[in-house]
Image (cartoon, rainbow, N blue to C red):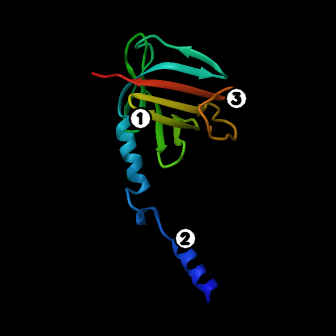
Amino acid sequence: MRVVVSAVLLLSGAFSTAEDKKGDPPWKDAKKELARLQGEWEAVRGERNGSVVEWRDGEKRFLLEKNKLFVFHPQTGKKIEWLTITIDPATSPKCIDLGGKGKGAMEGIYRLSGDTWTVCFDRDVKTVKERPTAFSTKGSPSLGILTLKRIKK
């Protein structure tokens, strides 16, 4: 009798959904997180294969509108659509996919801390890849890290 009761209790928990638990369903969490990422950003630091690059103020600017990431042309200031992003803030670390026009998606992870947005991504879209699990590029030539600061108006 104990075995049957234990099995019933175990199976009843297996069929619960995310909406059964307290808090918002995952799609609402993603919508809220995407809203937090909206606005203008400037790149302050990049990393590739362990080498760091730092940029001057305003040298590399980006704009996130809805799920479209735009880059500003450095000479003309013209806004150019660059990537489409999809996020999953329910994972740890948080996941991001960066898709270009007619290209595959670059898989990555991100963190948002105040006005700093850090993205670590696999730049190789042509081969089978694994999503990064840590914010490091050492020993991984296809990984890149981009650190952005929010531009306050």
102 w.r.t. 144: above or below: below
Indicate the position of residue 21 as horizontal and vertical percent values: 42, 63
The numbered disc on residue 140 is 3
Which amino acid lies under the numbered mark 3 shown in the image of this protein? Ser
Could you tell me which residue is drawn at 45 percent across and 30 percent down?
Answer: 117
Q: Which residue is mark 1?
A: 68
Q: Counting residues from the N terminus, which is met first, the one under dot 2 or under dot 1?
A: 2
The quarter of the image holding the C terminus is top left
Crowd class of label 2 (few under 14; some 14 to 19; many from 20; radius 10 Å):
few
147 w.r.t. 125: above or below: above
Q: Is residue 124 left or right of residue 72?
A: right
In the image, farthest residue toward the left? 153
Mark 2 and mark 1: span between their CA atoms? 37 Å
The numbered disc on residue 26 is none
Which amino acid lies under the numbered mark 2 shown in the image of this protein? Ala
Indicate the position of residue 91 as horizontal and vertical percent values: 52, 48
Q: Counting residues from the N terminus, which is met first, the one under dot 3 or under dot 2?
A: 2
Q: Which residue is mark 2?
A: 14
Indicate the position of residue 132 as horizontal and vertical percent values: 62, 37
